[in-house]
Structures are given as structure tokens and as C-alpha cells.
DNA sequence: TAGATTGTTAATCGATTAACAATC
DNA sequence: TAGATTGTTAATCGATTAACAATC
């Protein structure tokens, strides 16, 4: 199944999107779909869809297309959603609490089992059914629970230290929310959520589309009126 | 400056990363850097760095390299960070509040000037110095303020409606946090933050690296001990 | 069977890397 | 000047698209 040569990251990053579209189709009670129909919905070529899927196996049938439910399940399995991954959140600030309350992760098979912080006033607070623990308890916690992924939502300055600590304890997946590239001497997978990078790209694209050539001329002052 | 042919999105998405590394160099009081040195730090080729930068202009000097401060400023300008972009947040849940409190955006030139929600109990609450307004006030607000970007952190179901509303009011940039692709009949730029997509890719990479071949065998139960 | 659509190979396109003359 | 390093062209590599035989 996952044999042949390594699938490129470009393909892998498209898988969740396929997964979402298939979930939508299921919700609409559509049971079969051709690469052509799907390509129209997703705005990519049918050729790419077939190429992508065939990295993992022949899920379709000539003359028929793909069975939506089968394909949905297969892609879920490829993504490892059936692995019952467990997560912890380190950093119970706004972002950490947002993640703790996000229902979508659990729906996709990622179960949060711990939240950690250092601020005394937040220790013990219950967030989405889980009591915030002190980071000093992390060591002991990891000894008694399988933890696959640590979500790092701590302040910028301490992120490298916390990441190192988590990796040292044997946690293999780090989901990093700080605007930096983590470099660790451990065999871990790091996936970044660089929010400000994303926002800056949005800024670039706005500039390119709507202010071509008119860069730098501050417009902040010219609100059409001002609160008043 | 921004002439010639369109710069590819692949290049654009690398710009914030260059910007971060240059900020770090500045902080370390490093005033000049060669593409070779920078390539070693960033883990990409020197050739790529020079190609990328030369999409926008010749910022370097033969035999010398690049002046860190100049390059930092230039990339900032290219990203439009000097445009004094204004933002609003629609959806004052956990994620919205996280964004409202995130200092990094303002540091990069994105100023939040409004927060909106529908829940009566949160209207009027002050978050990072800004009072939450009712979404019904959005229309009037946009008439009196320049709003470049709307950050959409509303529940999944209402995201398309809210996005449509924002676009209709003339907001040109949408930062979408819902796990869906927005399709709007307006000329807007949409930048997505698909958190669950990112998490699923992390799941895939964990599976690939550490469980090759052993997919699907649930390991959730085998915590080494269990809280006890 | 005829029509539809896959899986897969070949062709194209774009992005990355290498090479090197120009020049500080 | 000699050494270093850019800007840029050419070569390579990888990813996307097109084409089509296989087959349901």
C-alpha cells in the first residue's frame, strides 16, 4: 500500500483538501464521483487527481469513477486518522485554549489528553474537560500516557526550550505556532503554523492586486471619516 | 521595482521566512550577509536566495553580499508591511481573542481596529483595548474606517455568509480560519489557515516515519500505565 | 456492445540548482 | 590587484498536464 518511492510533500499537502471535499460529497449523499467532476469542484485538473490518488493505490474503477465513501476512508487511513493519535497542548494562553476547544481535531482522530502551562493562576482550570497541569508534571505524564503530538502555543522566547523538552521526552510530533524554525537534535517531525507569515503573504497579495506601483504611501490616516 | 512578470507564489511564500531570518540577524548585530552564509542558516541553496531576491531587484553588491538592514527593509516593503494595513476580527471566540491579543501582527504593520460577534454576553467586552461590537454594526463601521483585512474566526456553518458579507462591504482581504474553501463572486484575496489540514499532514508524516507499514493498528489503549 | 473513465506513460511546464562572467 | 560574491543565463530536476490504451 505505502510502497514504491516516497510520495512528494506537494501531494501529501493536498490530501486533507481531498478529504474535505469527499466529506462534503458524503454529506450531500453523493455516492460516486469521477475525477472530472471532482476536478470541476476543486478547481484542479482531473489528471492531477488521478495522479495523486495513484500514488497510494488504484481506488477507482474504469467507466465508473470513484466510490466516495471508499475513497474517503482510504484517504483517512493514508493520513493516519485511524491511528488514534493523542495530543497535548503546551501553553494554555488564548491560542492553547482555542486549540483545546476546537472540535474538529477530535473528529479527525486527534484526541487531546493534556494541557500544560506555568502560570499558577491557570493551573487546575478546566478547559474542554481537561485540567491544566503544571509543566513540571509533563515528564511524569508522558511516562504514563502515549503522547504523539505536542502542540506548542507558548511565548516566542521559550519555544525552543519547550520544544527541546518535549522532544527529549520522546514526543515525536511537534506542532509549532511560534514564528521561528525549530532546530532540534532529535528525530521528530515538526509542522509549523506560521500565522504571521500567512498574514504577510496576504498583505503582499493585496498590495500586488490593488496597489500595484503605489507601495509605501501610508493610507492609515485617511479613514473616510473617523469614529466621531 | 515590481515590474517584469508576475512573481510566483512559491517565491512569495518564502519572503516572510527571509524576513524572519533577517530580523534575527539584525538582533544579533550582524550587518552584512552573503547568500552563502544565509543559505547555510536557512537550509536552502544560495542560488535560490539570489534568484528569489532578484525577482524584486538587485539588493546585493558583488564581493560584499547583502546589507542586512537594507534587505530587511526592502523585503518589508515588498510584503507591503509599510502599507499600514488595518484589520478587523469577526468572531470573538477563543481563536478570535487569540488573534486580538497576538502582538506580532502589529509589530509587522497590521493594526487591528475592530472585533465583532453576535453573542450578546460578549458584546462590549474589551479585548486588547478594543470593545467587541455586534456584527450588525459592521456595515456602519466599514463606512467610517478603512478596513483592509477581515480575519474570519466564526463557526464553520456561518463562515460563507460572513465572508460574503465582508466582501460585499468592500473588504479586499479575507483571512479564513474555517476548514473550507471560500468561493465568492467578488474580487477579494483569500488566504487560508487550515489548522486541521496542517495537523493531518503532521499525522501523515508521523505515520510515514514511525509506523511505516503498521497502519491502522490502534494504539490508543496501550498507555504505558494509565493515570491511576 | 458502446460509452465512460480509469491508471499510466509521455510531453510540457515551472521551479530549483549550477555555472560563470561581471564587478565590487 | 586578488578574492569574494553578486546577478543572470543555462542545465537539471520535479511536478503538472495531456494523451490514450485498458477495461469496467
Image (cartoon, coloured by chain):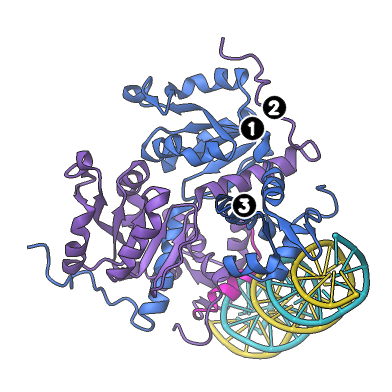
Chain colours: A blue, B purple, C yellow, D cyan
- Give the labeled residue for mark 3: A19
Dot 2 crowding, Cα within 10 Å, few <14, some 14–19, many 20+ = few
Task: Give the extent of the magenta segment.
Answer: B43-56
Secondary element at tag 2: loop
Whether residue A199 is situated above or below residue D8 in the rendered picture: above
- Give the labeled residue for mark 2: B219
- Give the labeled residue for mark 1: A84
| Residue A34 seen in the figure | yes
Q: Residue at x 53, y 85 (%)?
A: B5
Image side of residue B108 versus residue A30, left or right? left
Q: Residue at x 79, y 40 (%)?
A: B212
Mark pair 3, 1: CA separation:
17 Å
Q: Residue furthest left?
A: A228
Q: Residue at x 60, y 51 (%)?
A: A26
Image side of residue B177 versus residue D8, left or right? left
Whether residue B219 is situated above or below residue D22 in the rendered picture: above
Q: Quadrant of residue B191?
A: bottom left
Q: Position of residue A187 (x, y in %)?
A: 69, 39
- Give whichever of B25, A36 is nearer the camera: A36
Mark pair 2, 3: CA separation:
23 Å
Amino acid at each position: 500500500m505505502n510502497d514504491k518511492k516516497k510520495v512528494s510533500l506537494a501531494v501529501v499537502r493536498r490530501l486533507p483538501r481531498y478529504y474535505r471535499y469527499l466529506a462534503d460529497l458524503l454529506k450531500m449523499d453523493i455516492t460516486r464521483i469521477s475525477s472530472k467532476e471532482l476536478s470541476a469542484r476543486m478547481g484542479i485538473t482531473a489528471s492531477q487527481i488521478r495522479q495523486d490518488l495513484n500514488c497510494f493505490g488504484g481506488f477507482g474503477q474504469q467507466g465508473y469513477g470513484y466510490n466516495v465513501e471508499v475513497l474517503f476512508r482510504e484517504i483517512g487511513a493514508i493520513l493516519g486518522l485511524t491511528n488514534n493519535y493523542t495530543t497535548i497542548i503546551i501553553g494554555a494562553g488564548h491560542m492553547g485554549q482555542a486549540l483545546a476547544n476546537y472540535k474538529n481535531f477530535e473528529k479527525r482522530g486527534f484526541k487531546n489528553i493534556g494541557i500544560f502551562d506555568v502560570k499558577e493562576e491557570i493551573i487546575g482550570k478546566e478547559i474542554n474537560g481537561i485540567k491544566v497541569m503544571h509543566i513540571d508534571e509533563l515528564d511524569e505524564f508522558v511516562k504514563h500516557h502515549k503522547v504523539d503530538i505536542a502542540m506548542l502555543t507558548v511565548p516566542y522566547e521559550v519555544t525552543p526550550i519547550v520544544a527541546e523538552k518535549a522532544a527529549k521526552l520522546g514526543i515525536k510530533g511537534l506542532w509549532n505556532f511560534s514564528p521561528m524554525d525549530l532546530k532540534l537534535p532529535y528525530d521528530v517531525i515538526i509542522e509549523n503554523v506560521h500565522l504571521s507569515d500567512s498574514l504577510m503573504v496576504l498583505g503582499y497579495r493585496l498590495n500586488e492586486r490593488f496597489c500595484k506601483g503605489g507601495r509605501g504611501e501610508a493610507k492609515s490616516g485617511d479613514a473616510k471619516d473617523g469614529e466621531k
